[in-house]
Image (cartoon, rainbow, N blue to C red):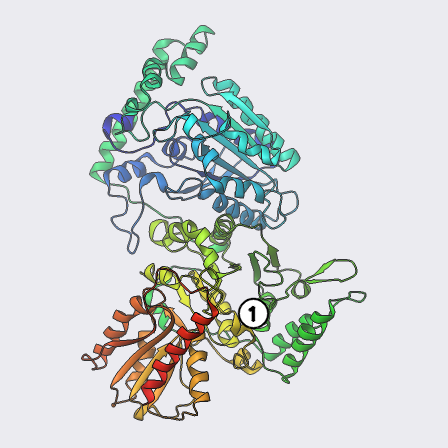
């Protein structure tokens, strides 16, 4: 009421009509604390959020007023902030039944996108509270709109996670604020079933229907829901049938589309009026007392507003406590420093021993025994170079021995899409799984979960997991890189912008298989250009690596830094077994991550006249071409850009400054011209050229022409295009 009259027309997504959600949450907390609950994580959309923040979670009214006045983010450097009904909050709430930690997840306007994020947060908090068995201490509450619950596919993805070993949180309490209208659409246009909650029938979750005007029934429904969740470890749904007093937002006119409904709502008494009359009839209070209570609160809020306008409250993000203690925000200068990612040979050998042995009585598949276990044995003795899959396992194993945990999830990631990882082995006689790295350090976890066939939900879960527990190296692997299309909402709204909007930091790794190898439009590109376009303010790291050692060190770097940034990896496919893609154990033990890799065929750069820059598989394409052509020129250097963002300008300047004869700089990529990295990095390169006195040069381009589709479906056409790229590259030597 106060906001409606003091900030006329301002969006607030009012709770009126669904007011009962606040006492419902109070009851859930009161009952839950009696039966083992210690913490609540809430994921919800906009409607009622401000009331829950203030009346249930205790967020200061002055903070809310500053957000309405637009002064909340004035003094927070490097933070762009977000609208008030997206902001999350955490608090420690005291009650007669004990204290309860409550967190409300930050979330964007994308309906229901917060669901898996909140569950990932819960999973991490359960680990922190050592509650991974019964999972009763940390409870997830998801508050939905009726149209969104019925219409958004992420709801079903989230429900499907509920009983899967890698994603279960011991049940979620779902509350649907069913106000019987979407933005402007009637229920007949937004769902095929009578109730929006019918989606939950897929899970056989109990659904409790209750009238939002009956506050005592709603409170009882919530009491039943939390007791059911704690007893059976299963999801439960409370479908609270109510209404929406105003339009979708307060400046909207709902009578345009629902004239009959809003004629009824206009004359319908509010919940406080209904319950007030009930209390008066039962002689518990009187009208004068109710009016005084209301006026006292309005006067109190007015006083806070006036004081806040004289001295505005500034939005405060929670300090780095608990799991985040010792960590900080990363800055631009941090990316110019080399991180110590070395590990001793003894550690590597210990990990290697775990990878190449298995329990007595365990019978691996003969091909695994020959190609993987025996092959890795030769790598650990130095008889064979280390390949990509082994480097990853050695990185993860070394972190585990050093006191860190690792979580990898994705479709078929235990084996790996390209049969390169084999982190989990299966007995051919019994089918029993065996995970070698789990034997290294029983105080730490190595979790490898084959996920449900979902990208959106699973990546959201991993994001939530990673923002709540930075001690884990958390990796999500797409089966093919372009499958990230299905998770684009999580990438755009959370991963690339979450720090800027909400100061939510994550060290989540996205492993996205990428490479143009004739597999067609859907299995070639991880859409590198989309990530490059999103790069700003040191928000993410984008890498396309060419050696196992680089992969080893970049994974370790994620944990060894005292800050967290998302890492997007254009992971290889054919390079997993390419004869040139290998590293020595010494490279792993004593090396470090290199943002650029120099040309091993050039000993002295002072005579270099042309520099060719490329990344990922494109390097091996051009390197193989010059080997086959027998070219041994010291006039052209091929440099690998291993890290595309943050752009390694200092390292590039250093190598360019070594030659005074430069007459051209060229970028080679396998992606179409309107895709890949070229269009984003070209101006960055040209800034570097100006800095080293090459202001008259422009970055030349070799690659495919602009296309609507990432790749051809014809192997013959693919090979023709590859041949044209190589020919243009070889022409540089003429």
Number of marks in picture: 1
Q: Nearest the camera: 414 or 516?
A: 516
- Where residue 578 sits in the image (x, y, percent)? 54, 78
- Extreme residue in the right direction: 361
Q: Is residue 395 left or right of residue 336?
A: right
- Where residue 256 sits in the image (x, y, percent)? 28, 24
- Where residue 402 sits in the image (x, y, percent)? 58, 68
In the image, is residue 313 above or below residue 492?
above
Q: Nearest the camera: 715 or 205?
A: 715
* Quadrant of res 703: bottom left
- At x 40% / y 73%, what residue is drawn? 721
In the image, is residue 480 above or below residue 649?
above
Q: Is mark 1 on a helix, strand or loop?
A: helix
* Quadrant of res 262: top left
In the image, is residue 710 above or below residue 20?
below
- Where residue 326 sits in the image (x, y, percent)? 45, 60
Q: Nearest the camera: 560 or 587?
A: 587
- At x 29% / y 83%, what residue is drawn? 656
Judge whether residue 277 can be spotted in this image: yes
Looking at the figure, which quarter contains the N terminus? top left
Classify 10 Å Cα crowding around label 1: few (below 14), some (14-19), many (20 and above): many
Judge whether residue 562 can be spotted in this image: no
Residue highlighted by disc 1: 392
Q: Is residue 59 left or right of residue 4?
A: right
């Amino acid at each position: 009421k106060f906001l409606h009259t003091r900030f006329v027309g301002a969006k607030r997504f009012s709770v009126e009509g669904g007011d009962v959600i606040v006492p419902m949450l109070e009851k859930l907390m009161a009952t839950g604390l009696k039966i083992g609950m210690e913490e609540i994580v809430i994921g919800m959309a906009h409607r009622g959020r401000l009331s829950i923040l203030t009346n249930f979670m205790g967020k200061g009214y002055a903070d809310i007023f500053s957000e309405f006045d637009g002064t909340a983010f004035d003094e927070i450097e490097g933070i762009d902030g977000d609208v008030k009904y997206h902001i999350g909050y955490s608090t420690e709430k005291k009650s007669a039944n004990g204290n309860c930690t409550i967190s409300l997840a930050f979330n964007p306007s994308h309906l229901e996108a917060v669901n898996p994020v909140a569950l990932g947060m819960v999973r991490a908090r359960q680990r922190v509270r050592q509650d991974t068995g019964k999972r009763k201490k940390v409870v997830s509450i998801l508050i939905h709109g009726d149209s969104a619950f019925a219409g958004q596919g992420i709801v079903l993805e989230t429900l499907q996670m509920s009983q899967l070993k890698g994603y279960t949180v011991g049940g979620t309490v779902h509350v649907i604020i069913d106000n019987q209208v979407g933005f402007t659409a009637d229920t007949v246009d937004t769902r095929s079933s009578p109730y929006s909650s019918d989606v939950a029938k897929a899970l056989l979750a109990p659904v409790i229907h209750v009238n939002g005007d009956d506050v005592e029934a709603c409170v009882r429904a919530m009491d039943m829901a939390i007791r059911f969740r704690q007893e059976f470890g299963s999801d439960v749904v409370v479908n609270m049938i109510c209404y929406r007093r105003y339009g979708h937002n307060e400046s909207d006119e709902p009578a345009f589309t629902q004239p009959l409904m809003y004629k009824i709502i206009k004359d319908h008494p509010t919940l406080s009026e209904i319950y007030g009359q009930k209390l008066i009839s039962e002689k518990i209070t009187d009208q004068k007392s109710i009016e005084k209570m209301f006026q006292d609160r309005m006067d109190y809020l007015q006083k806070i507003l006036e004081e806040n306008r004289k001295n505005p409250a500034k939005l405060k993000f929670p300090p780095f406590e608990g799991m985040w203690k010792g960590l900080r925000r990363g800055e631009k200068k941090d990316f110019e420093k080399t991180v110590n990612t070395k590990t001793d040979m003894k550690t590597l050998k210990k990990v290697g021993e775990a990878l190449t042995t298995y329990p007595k009585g365990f019978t691996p598949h003969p091909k695994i025994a020959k190609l993987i276990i025996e092959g890795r044995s030769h790598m650990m003795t130095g008889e064979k170079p280390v390949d990509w899959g082994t480097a990853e396992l050695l990185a993860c194993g070394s972190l585990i021995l050093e006191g860190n945990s690792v979580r990898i999830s994705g479709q078929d990631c235990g084996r790996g899409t390209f049969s390169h990882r084999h982190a989990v082995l299966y007995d051919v006689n019994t089918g029993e799984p065996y995970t070698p790295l789990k034997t290294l350090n029983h105080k730490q976890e190595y979790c490898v979960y084959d996920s449900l066939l979902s990208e959106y939900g699973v990546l959201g879960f991993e994001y939530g997991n990673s923002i709540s527990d930075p001690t884990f190296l958390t990796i999500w692997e797409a089966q093919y890189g372009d499958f990230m299309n299905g998770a684009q909402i999580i990438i755009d709204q959370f991963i690339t912008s979450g720090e800027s909007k909400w100061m939510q930091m994550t060290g989540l790794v996205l492993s996205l298989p990428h490479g143009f190898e004739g597999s067609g439009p859907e299995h070639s590109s991880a859409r590198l250009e989309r990530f490059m376009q999103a790069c700003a303010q040191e928000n993410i790291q984008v890498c396309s690596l060419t050696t196992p050692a680089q992969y080893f060190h970049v994974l370790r770097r994620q944990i060894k830094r005292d800050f967290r940034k998302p890492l997007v990896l254009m992971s290889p496919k054919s390079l997993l077994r390419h004869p040139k893609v290998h590293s020595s154990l010494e490279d792993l033990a004593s090396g470090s991550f290199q943002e650029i890799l120099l040309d091993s065929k050039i000993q002295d750069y002072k005579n270099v006249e042309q520099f060719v820059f490329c990344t990922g598989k494109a390097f091996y394409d051009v390197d193989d071409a010059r080997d086959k052509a027998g070219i041994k020129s010291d006039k052209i250097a091929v440099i690998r850009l291993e890290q595309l963002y943050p752009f390694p300008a200092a390292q590039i300047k250093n190598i360019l400054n070594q030659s005074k004869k430069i007459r051209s700089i060229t970028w080679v990529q396998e992606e179409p011209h309107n895709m890949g990295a070229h269009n984003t990095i070209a101006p960055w390169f040209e800034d570097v050229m100006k800095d080293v006195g090459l202001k008259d040069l422009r970055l030349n381009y070799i690659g495919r022409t602009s296309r609507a589709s990432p790749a051809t479906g014809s192997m013959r056409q693919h090979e023709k295009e590859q041949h044209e790229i190589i020919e243009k590259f070889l022409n540089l030597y003429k």
